[in-house]
Image: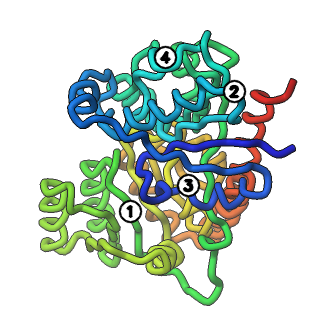
Amino acid sequence: MRVNATYMRWDHHAQPSGYPRIFDALGTRVTLRWLAPARLPGALSRRLAPRAQAPMYRTESLGYEVAVARKLLRPGGGICHFLYGEWMLEYLPRLAPPRLRLGGPVVATFHLSPRRLRRWQPSKQAMLALDAVVALDPLQAEYLEKIVGNGRVFVAHHGVSTGFFAPDPRIEYDRHLFLCVGHTSRDFDVFTEVARRVGSREPRAKFMVVAALHKQPKLAERLLEQQRAGRIAVHHGLSDEQLRRAYQSAAALFLPLRDATANNALMESLACGTPVVTTDVGGVKYYTGDDAAALRRRDDVDGMCDDLLDISRDEERRAAMSGHARKRAVELDFERAADSLMAVYRQLTDP
């Protein structure tokens, strides 16, 4: 079965981060087309975009909705898929009311956790106008079902490139190095406290943060202050190859989180066979499975310290977690992520 699908991405100048590989995998099964936003009078866009319920809705979002509406009011055209539903939907039910549509089904993927969706989601009217909603984990799906109803919400997991992110037996990991990657929804209060306590128990411990902090000046200053105190090292601007080597070189990924659905750093670490110590929130357990990560409550700082030190000192435990991590990542590979998305498309297009 081959599906005809048109995609709306957040930035039409480049494929969105995290997605190119899944479309490589879909390419043999889906006729792909990227839809550019419609050109609209600037005054109209500036007047309507701020009125949308979703805070991140912008003029380009309106251009996408107009372009999709034009497709929907003509026969055929296959599936229309909004890749970032939180930021791209508001006016579609008025531009192309469901009763007048002649085109194919309309799908939107949502990336934010339920807690963040409560603030950032589109209007209920816009969400009810979708034929299908794609969630990235079961807890997110449960929340979305309360809005759009059962039968229209599907879980299609996020993917990771297990060909690129993979263990390298030539690289010997540093048993005293703990890595943290990214900044969105990271719990740096917990991170700095754990770094302090672990450092007091194991003077050789090293904590490394890899994050793009140019848009987070307060956080950047806080982390740089910790770096000046000798507790952590901060890096940014790493190439993909350098980031991969950082995963491969660490004893564990330490990823304290405030919230999560799918998390690229988590999945990349698993793919490299690097054990994970993280917070049991949102969709984390869905992605780690049972044995690849040590999951703790946010307030269990002592438990996180114990996990990091145990992984550092117990080579047998680390080896077992590493094997489970790689196995789980293979289950989440982009090819399998494409399979899960194709399953959604089949349900929408099969007679």
Which label sits in the foreground, 2 or 3?
2
Question: Do the residues bearing badges 4 and 3 touch, measured as CB atoms within 8 Å?
Answer: no
Residue named by callout 4:
93
| Residue drawn 42% across the image and 55% down it | 255
| Residue drawn 70% across the image and 17% down it | 151
Identify the secondary structure beneath mark 3.
loop
Residue 48: x and y, percent? 27, 25
Viewer-proximal residue among 94 and 335:
94
**Left or right: where does residue 38 sit relative to residue 346?**
left
Q: Is residue 41 visible?
A: yes
Which label sits in the foreground, 1 or 3?
3
| Residue drawn 49% across the image and 80% down it | 241
Q: CA distance from mark 1 to mark 3?
A: 22 Å
- Specify the quadrant of the image occupied by residue 119: top left
Kind of residue at disc 3:
Tyr
Residue 223: x and y, percent? 19, 63
Q: CA distance from mark 1 to mark 2?
A: 49 Å
Residue named by callout 3:
19
Name which of mark 4 and mark 1 comes first in the sequence: 4
Residue named by callout 1:
180
Residue named by callout 2:
75
Identify the secondary structure beneath mark 2.
loop
Residue 294: x and y, percent? 54, 51
Identify the secondary structure beneath mark 4.
helix
Name which of mark 2 and mark 4 comes first in the sequence: 2
Residue 178 higher or lower than 93, as above or below? below
Identify the secondary structure beneath mark 1.
strand
